[in-house]
Amino acid sequence: MTEDNIINMPIKDSKCPICSKPAVHKYKPFCSKRCADVDLGKWFSESYSLPEDETDVDDYSSVEE
Ligand SMILES: [Zn+2]
């Protein structure tokens, strides 16, 4: 078996978090590059739109009146 076969093999007990199909070693923990890209895009857009409420907490002490 070549290394290429191994990385394309489904991982037992590991499901793709995007589509719930069996994940493969190559794109672990995803089933395909497509799902890996989807997750990456999701992660990026979430971090971009992350609310900055927590940093405001620090401001309260200095602006407190
Ligand atoms: Zn998938």
Image (spheres, grey):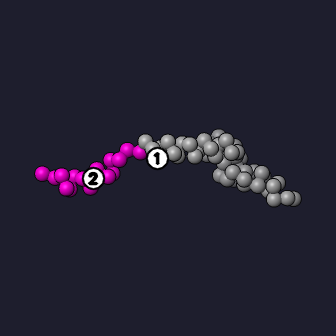
Q: Which mark is residue 57?
A: 2
- Dominant SS of magenta comes to helix
**Is the CB of mark 1 within 8 Å of ligand 1?**
no
Q: Earlier in the sequence, mark 1 or mark 2?
A: 1
Asked if the magenta segment contains residue 14, the reply would be no
Q: Amino acid at mark 1?
A: Ser
Q: Which one is closest to the eye, mark 1 or mark 2?
A: 1
Is 28 placed left or right of 54 in the picture?
Answer: right
**How many residues crowd mark 2 within 10 Å: few (<14), some (14–19), many (20+)?**
few
Q: In this picture, is 12 found above or below 34?
A: below
**Quadrant of residue 32 in the image?**
top right
User: Is residue 31 shown above or below 6?
Assistant: above
The image shows residue 54 at horizontal and vertical percentages of: 33, 51
Residue 38 rendering spot, x and y as whole percentages: 60, 41
Disc 1 from disc 2: Cα separation: 19 Å
Which numbered disc covers residue 32? none
Query: What is the magenta range?
Result: 50-65
Element type where label 2 sits in the image: helix
Look at 78% across and 52% down and name the residue there. 9
Question: At 18% across and 52% down in the image, what residue appears?
Answer: 63
Q: Is residue 64 magenta?
A: yes
Residue lying at the far right of the rendered structure: 1
Circle 2: residue type: Val
From this viewpoint, is residue 20 visible?
A: no
Q: Residues within 10 Å of mark 1 (few under 14, many from 20)?
A: few
Residue found 24% across the figure and 53% down from its top: 59
Query: Which residue bears the numbered disc 1?
Result: 47
Instruction: Classify the position of the N terminus by image quarter.
Output: bottom right
Disc count in the image? 2
Q: Position of residue 15 (x, y in %)?
A: 66, 48
The secondary structure type at the circle numbered 1 is helix
